[in-house]
Amino acid sequence: MDDEVFDQIVTVFNSLVSWVAAGAMVFGGVVPYIPQYRDIRRSQNAEGFSTYVCLVLLVANILRILFRFGRYFETLLLWQSIIMIATMLIMLNLCTNVRMATDLNTKRRSFIDFDWNYFWSWSHFMDYMQCVLAFTLVAAYVTYLLLDSALFVESLGFLAVFTEAMLGTPQLYCNYQNKSTEGMSIKMVLMWTSGDTFKTGYFLLTQAPVQFWTCGLLQVGVDFAILFQVYYYSRFPQKPLSHTVSHTTSAKAL
């Protein structure tokens, strides 16, 4: 009798852990952007957030969803991509509205201008939606044509997770250019590191496709490189602390 009760407790505990892990996988990636969203709404200033973060994550997660048509992976990871896409569209909508309200004298730019100099710097949210839709349709059509090619499918999966893994490199490069991490939220970097570490461990434990965990390890490496910059530039400052941080300082998220 005691053994049966113990087995039931273990089963319930395992189920609870599985649900918590699943929730962390699905929603954990969007958590760092919640304080950023609230800060932009409160300050009505979007200069501290780079919309190229949204671009990278939109491309990565759209490609990941297409990859699933050729190589099955867990449904949780599919929902993670869908929720991340929705989150990035919400961030884009907020940033566009704020910048429209503050830059009244700026000439309006649109997606259909096809001006490469103003790519991803358009004036209306619908322009971003048009670009995302166009990319999705083209990528889906190419995937449909080449779905029988194992090389294409595996390359598509690698490209999806590699794009996401490179998300922190603009921040890394910007810190190197500025010779400082001033203006960058260390708490956010710690959240990225803990989240990426958990995600990579999840990929390994669930035997996800090799592209997922190899690029996850790369992403963790980039996070630790940024943390090393925090230590190095605080220990050996190379610029006055009062220097002005460029607009691109928050290439991933402040």
Image: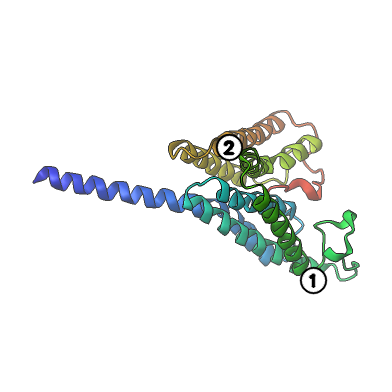
| Residue placed under numbered mark 1 in the picture | 101
- Can you give x and y, in whole percent of width and height, for residue 94 in the image? 70, 66
Indicate which disc residue 233 carries. Answer: none
Q: Residue at x 43, y 51 (%)?
A: 22
Q: Identify the coloring.
A: rainbow
The first of marks 1 and 2 along the sequence is: 1
Q: How many marks?
A: 2
For label 2, the SS is: helix
Asked if residue 127 is positioned above or below residue 209 in the image, the reply reads below
Q: In the displayed structure, does residue 247 sit left or right of residue 235?
A: right
At which x and y percent is residue 55?
A: 72, 53
Residue 110 visible in the displayed image: no
Residue 9, compared with residue 83, is above or below; it is above
**Residue 213 location in percent, x, y?**
54, 36
Q: Residues within 10 Å of mark 1 (few under 14, many from 20)?
A: few
Q: Are marks 1 and 2 in contact (CB under 8 Å)?
A: no
Mark identifier at residue 211: 2
Using the rendered view, name the quadrant where residue 39 is placed. bottom right
In the rendered view, tell whether residue 84 sits above or below residue 229: below
Left or right of 154 on screen, residue 16: left
Residue drawn 59% across and 58% down?
34
Secondary structure beneath label 1: helix
Left or right of 116 in this view: 216: left
The amino acid pointed to by label 2 is Gln
Q: Nearer the viewer, mark 1 or mark 2?
A: 2
* Closer-to-camera residue (157/21): 157
Q: What distance separates the C-alpha of mark 1 from that of mark 2?
A: 42 Å
Residue at x 49% of width, y 49% of height: 25
